[in-house]
Image: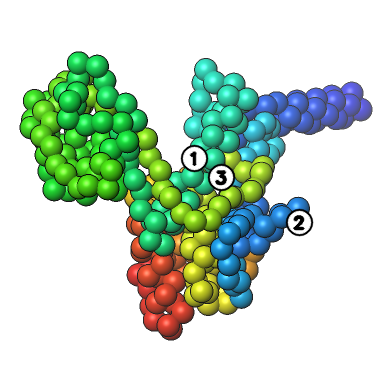
Amino acid sequence: MRRRGVTVLLGALLTALLSVGVLSVPIPYVVLGPGPTVNTLGAEDGKEIIQVTGRPTSTSAGQLRLTTVGVQPTVRLRSALAGWFSRDEAVVPRELVYPPGESQQEIEKRNVEDFQNSQTSAETAALRKLGYPIEVLVKGVTAGGPSVGVLRPGDVLTSVDGQQVTSAAKLTELIRAKPAGSALKIGYVRDGVTATAAVTSREQDGRPRIGIEIDQQQPHPFTLKIDLADIGGPSAGLMFALGIVDKLEPADLTGGKIIAGTGTIDDEGRVGPIGGIAQKLVGAKEAGAKVFLVPADNCTEAVRNPQPDLPLLRVASLDDALKALETLRAGGQPTRC
């Protein structure tokens, strides 16, 4: 009887030790949780996040908070089990965040680049909204190409077949809208004189082109800089763009409220989807947000992961976001997810 008791005790101890070992072994998953939120109208380390020189700026009674997702890169079974049972976290396969064949350093570098690009696009979209259009210039003409003798370096391209050129990306889109060999009517400004010219596109690298190198500029009589470190990815674009507009316009976009949101943005002001919407909603709620701006393509997922008393406003563009906030300030009901 005594020997049997010792055997049971040793078996239980061995099972416990094995369980601890299994629970401590890293597994190929990561845990996503709510990350920090940042008020784009505020300051970090004593410096304003959105810095404007050469033009007066306005102040806001509320906040425009970008939201982030925290990633736990090394996960053990114990943490994964806790994450699976948590309402605020998600456990996902590691390759969704860290693709095979890429080092963590490479991924972090790309995230930094995406974050910087999101700032540039936010500035471009906000300045366009404030009345500073993009100018697409001819930087060079390819020797032997279809634009030789027609376009010159320094020409400002304004239209293709009557459709306005609003960005370098838009010019490319308009040229590719018709097959190679199409005669395109190109509008341009040279030395202050408006003119049009016919250019027949040619196929190069499988795509129609008109044989020019282009550059993009957006003249404005002040300097603008976004200064924020330790955040990666492209999803802060919308909130940066709103912060820029709020600073440079007299109206307080927030109406005195804490507004949170997320979404990529391109030079045209279009808002794109992001990852981790459920965790971002949790972070926004913890930060005291009274409303959340959701990219249109993320609405279905956001509705599945609601936070109490946190209305979800559907936005597909910078214009949508501005109209939603204006409606909110007027006491109306913006479009919800």
- The disc, 2 or 3, on the residue closer to the chain's N-terminal end is 2
| As drawn, 292 above or below 134 | below
Point out which mark residue 117 bears: 1
Q: Is residue 322 left or right of residue 250?
A: left
Q: Amino acid at mark 2?
A: Gly
Classify mark 1: residues with Cα within 10 Å, few (<14), some (14-19) or many (20+).
some
- Of the residues under marks 2 and 1, which one precedes in the sequence? 2
Gap between marks 2 and 1 measured at Cα: 24 Å
Q: Mark 2 — residue?
A: 46
Residue beneath disc 3: 90
Q: Residues within 10 Å of mark 2 (few under 14, many from 20)?
A: few
Q: Position of residue 127 (x, y in %)?
A: 43, 56
Contact, mark 2 vs mark 1 (Cβ under 8 Å): no
Residue at x 61%, y 25% (from the top left corner): 104
**CA distance separating discs 1 and 3:** 27 Å
State whether residue 282 appears in this view: no
- Label 2 to label 3, Cα distance in Å? 34 Å
